[in-house]
Image (spheres, grey):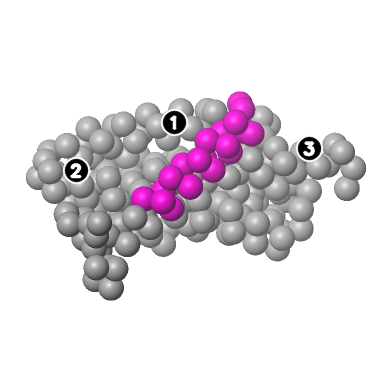
Amino acid sequence: MDAHDAILLTTQLAMGFALAATVGLRAFLPLFVAGLLARQGYVSLGDSFAWMESTPALVVFGSAVVFEILGDKIPMVDHAMDAAGVFIKPAAGTLVAAALLTNVDPVVATVLGLIGGGAIAGTVHAVKGTARIFSTGTTAGAGNPILSFIEDAIATLGIIVALLIPVLAAILVLGLVVFGIRVFRQRRMGSDPASGASPLHPTP
């Protein structure tokens, strides 16, 4: 691998992982954007993932985007979608990250996509779900649509940054993942009876 190939691989990994983070907020929007831009020649997809730019795929992705964005604004429906997202979003994150690796064997690309993209999408989705549960508990669901609009904006901005400044976007994603892991570790320690502590009465 020469210097050009190394730079290309680094850029593609950064872009894929950054887009996978936005999958954690909106599962199908990054897939639709990647397929559409590939069809217009602005990004390249691996040969095994060229189907993503086909008309049927774009129709399916586009319809799913509309359904997801609208459904996420309806209390209780959003929780059902979050439950399904536990399985859908890591798969979608794996797909979008693997698809952008044009000079890598498809099997290797899928493995890298799963390790990086799938894990990142799942982590962001977990943080999103936690925020949604908190919003439901504190506002009886009234604040969920507002939170959903904020997530729409963050996902859209994240996709733009991932495409234009992929390395910076990947660094921001890494920080978000580390933050998410720390939050969940603290929650587990606070709720673990064996630790002798609780969120309301921490052990001195």
Give me the C-alpha separation between circle 1 and circle 3: 26 Å
Q: Is residue 106 above or below residue 36?
A: below
Q: Are marks 1 and 3 in contact (CB under 8 Å)?
A: no
State the count of labels: 3
- Tell me if I can see residue 39 in this picture: no
Mark 3 lies on residue = 7
Residue type, numbered disc 1 = Thr
Q: Considering depth in this image, is 104 or 49 the residue closer to the camera?
A: 104
Tell me which residue sits at (61%, 28%) in the image.
Answer: 165
Give me the C-alpha separation between circle 3 and circle 2: 42 Å
Q: Secondary structure at mark 1?
A: helix
Residue type, numbered disc 2 = Ser
Q: Secondary structure at mark 2?
A: helix
The answer to which image quadrant residue 193 occupies is bottom left
The answer to whether residue 178 is magenta is yes
Q: Which residues are magenta?
A: 164-183
Mark 2 lies on residue = 135
Front of the two marks 1 and 3: 3
Q: Which disc, if any, is residue 156?
A: 1
